Image: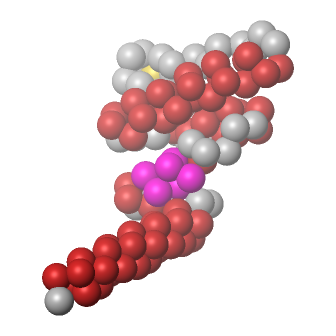
Amino acid sequence: MKATRAVAFSLACGAGFALGWYLAGRHLEEHKEALFSPNRFKRLAALSYVAGQDSVETVRLLRDYVAWEPSAALRRRAERVLQRMTATLGTRQGAMTRAPTAVGTGRGGVASGPGGSEATA
């Protein structure tokens, strides 16, 4: 009787883990293009997805995002992802220029958007 319960519990835990993994991946896949969305949670999901995509184009996208992001917490997370990504790509492809981190962070400039101009205070 105890062995049957233990097996059933193990199978239920495994199924719950697999279902959670599938749903989390589906959620990230749905919101991968919402990096510049007005919804913070969609931007967080998109940033999590982008964090796993190491490419030069992603670095360029993240630089625009860091300059645009109005939320300080999401901007710091994006800066960490950007630093990790430039370090990873830098070891693979030679020296890469470092991303500017002071743009749009409230330290002298206000970014209007990914393609917009920047007004200095």
Colour scheme employed for the rendering of this structure: secondary structure
- Quarter occupied by residue 29: bottom right
Question: Where is the N terminus found, in terms of image quarters?
Answer: bottom left
Does residue 70 appear left or right of residue 114 in this picture? left
Does residue 121 appear left or right of residue 48 in this picture? left
Residue most extreme to the top: 95
Does residue 33 appear left or right of residue 110 in this picture? right
State yes or no: residue 44 in magenta. Answer: yes
Q: Position of residue 14 (x, y in %)?
A: 39, 73
Main SS category, magenta section: helix
Q: Residue at x 58, y 17 (%)?
A: 100
Q: Position of residue 109 (x, y in %)?
A: 46, 22
Q: Residue at x 31, y 80 (%)?
A: 7
Please say if 10 is above or below 54.
Answer: below
Q: Is residue 20 in view?
A: no
Q: Nearer the viewer, residue 63 or 51?
A: 51
Q: Which residues are magenta?
A: 43-49
Q: Nearer the viewer, residue 92 or 97?
A: 92
Question: Where is the C terminus found, in terms of image quarters?
Answer: top left
Please say if 29 is above or below 12.
Answer: above
Q: Residue at x 47, y 27 (%)?
A: 80
